[in-house]
Amino acid sequence: MELFGYFAAILMGLSLGMIGGGGSILTVPILVYLFKINPVMATAYSLFIVGLTSLIGGIFYLKKGEVDLKMGTLFAVPSFVGVYLTRAYVVPSLPEQMSLGPIEFSKALLIMMVFAVLMVAASVSMVVKREPKKEKSQLSLGTRMTLIAFEGLIVGGITGFVGAGGGFLVIPALVVLVGLPMKIAVGTSLFIIAVKSLLGFVGDFQHQVGIDWQLLLTLSGIAALGLFIGVALSKKVSDQSLKKGFGYFVLVMGLFVLVDQLRKF
């Protein structure tokens, strides 16, 4: 199974290179299902792998002038705060076993369920055709900037909880709320994901023991190879096709994880 895991790591990098997200969506299932790693530890590993790979991709897009640093920073700073606090304090404080009335479930199951639901919700925002320009024109610049910063904080907290880089939430926010073209959103998203994920891993590092650094660096290297392949392919695909393709991809993966986790109740 591990052999398939290494192959899937290439697809993870391919996803990051083409659409600036989706890497963590693949990484967590790869680690859980193919490498048999506990979901809580897998979310920590995912932050490091996706963060390092995204950093490489973000630098590449920055050199091409396809990163909006102003809007990216406005979104990213509160997002960094959210993800660090969540990984450092919220996740470690949750009990290993919880209950909701007669229903009992583990912390790992809760994380995977929230992860799957967010994937499905995010996919809808990318697939459903919208006309956001009219809505944005009615808002003042100050209001829009406040909304962007607030959403960054919320996205940071949510993605910190599920251990995902957050491209499947960051990109819809950059495209729909900020109004960035898809390919600029890709480069900007990679930078946000990189710093946010690595900060989240630092928060985790304080609590995790027995980290398999060899596995982390190996998967990161393979994913980086896939990323550059994805960057090359993205030049031949339109913004709209990338957006819809990403949305359907997230939807399929989200439904798969959701059904799999529901079987465990």
Image: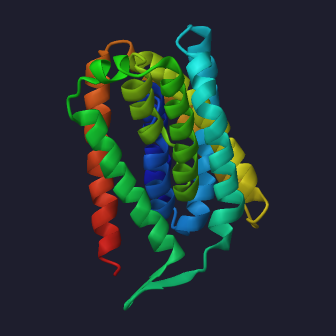
**Image quarter of residue 62:** top right
| Nearer-the-camera pick, 79 or 260 | 79
- Classify 25 as above or below 113: above
The residue located at (37%, 58%) in the rendering is 116
Quadrant location of the N terminus? bottom left
> Looking at the picture, how far across and down is residue 147, in whole percent?
49, 33
The answer to whether 113 appears left or right of 142 in the picture is left
The answer to whether 101 appears left or right of 226 in the picture is left
- Classify 54 as above or below 44: above
The residue located at (64%, 20%) in the rendering is 59
**Image quarter of residue 261:** bottom left
| Nearer-the-camera pick, 54 or 105 | 105
The answer to whether 230 appears left or right of 138 in the picture is right
Quadrant location of the C terminus? bottom left
- Classify 78 as above or below 59: below
> Looking at the picture, how far across and down is residue 82, in whole percent?
63, 48
The residue located at (68%, 44%) in the rendering is 81
In the rendered image, the residue lying farthest to the left is 129
> Looking at the picture, how far across and down is residue 98, in whole percent?
51, 83
- Classify 128 as above or below 253: above
Please say whether residue 229 is visible from this viewpoint.
no
In the rendered image, the residue lying farthest to the right is 206
**Image quarter of residue 206:** bottom right
The residue located at (67%, 72%) in the rendering is 93
Q: How many marks?
A: 0
Please say whether residue 175 is visible from this viewpoint.
yes
> Looking at the picture, how far across and down is residue 89, in whole percent?
70, 63
| Nearer-the-camera pick, 114 or 15 | 114
